[in-house]
Image: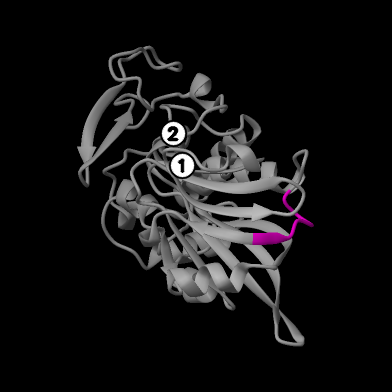
Amino acid sequence: MPELPEVETVARTLRTGTPALIGQTIRDVLVLWPRQVAHPSPTAFAQGLSGARIQAVDRYGKYLLIGLRTSQGCQEADSVLLVHLRMSGRLELVPEAQAVTRHARLVWRLDGGLALRFEDARKFGRAWWVTDPAVVLGKLGPDALAISAEVFVARARSRRGALKPLLLDQSFIAGIGNIYADESLYLSGLHPKRLVATLNEAELLRLHTAIQYVLRAGIAANGASVDWVYPGGHFQEHFAVYGRAGQPCHRCGQPIQRILVAQRSTFFCPSCQPS
């Protein structure tokens, strides 16, 4: 599943690429898989977005946010299109002639011969059109790239359980998935099964610093490409532990181990991350 760095890379490409999505007008919407629309109804989604002007492209956690200006009679109103790519979603600006493909689920046809295409082979991705993004994002914790050290420590103090599941809990911190959790825990020298309640403030601050570093490194590398879902990233070339079971640790030379934590494959160094 694309995580924060991959989603940030998609947002950056749509925002600053050539051509850019900002400034485009949605001519009409093709709903090729109605279940891809989480809110409102597919019909209202398609009708309401027709004629909307795209004003901004942002990200929160693993969600893409596309700011819109829509017309309602004689008045104009701001709204937001939210997209969650889930396991296999890809959102790309393409020539209109290439918009409808085998796995295209939603297509926003734009003025000027372009289209925004939402491909999703596994059909788990979702799109929302809302006036207030808090309707969708309100259940999430602070964005993992924006959370301050003080807020991170305070929120961790109120939690129980093991570290790895906590980092994956989007209500605690939004944007981290399996890859960046493992890499952050390795960089901070913390075992993925370590109980949160046993960490002192210095260890929590070290984890916060590691998260920030790993996420920014992932963004600088355009994310990680570990399968066909998200091409073009290079962060996998810099993995310290993820997917490296049996290979030597870059620090100490001990073999990286793979275990299951909360039913998720988890990679760590038993020497650099003692329990």
- Compute the Cα span from label 1 to label 2: 8 Å
Image x and y of residue 82, in percent: 54, 62
Q: Is residue 23 magenta?
A: yes
Seen from the viewer's position, the closer of residues 65 and 183 is 65
Residue drawn at (38%, 12%) of the image: 253
Q: Residues within 10 Å of mark 2 (few under 14, many from 20)?
A: some
CB contact under 8 Å: marks 1 and 2: yes
* Badge 1 element: loop
Seen from the viewer's position, the closer of residues 126 and 160 is 126
Vertical side of 130 occupied by 211: above or below: above
Seen from the viewer's position, the closer of residues 12 and 50 is 50
Residue drawn at (33%, 43%) of the image: 122
Q: Which mark is residue 79?
A: none
Q: Which residues are magenta?
A: 21-27
Residue type beneath disc 1 = Pro
Q: Is the N terminus in the top left, top right, bottom left or bottom right quadrant?
A: top left
Q: Which mark is residue 2?
A: 1
Q: Is the C terminus in the top left, top right, bottom left or bottom right quadrant?
A: top left
Q: Is residue 7 magenta?
A: no
Residue drawn at (37%, 40%) of the image: 121
Q: Which mark is residue 229?
A: 2
* Badge 2 element: loop
Residue type beneath disc 2 = Val
Seen from the viewer's position, the closer of residues 20 and 100 is 100
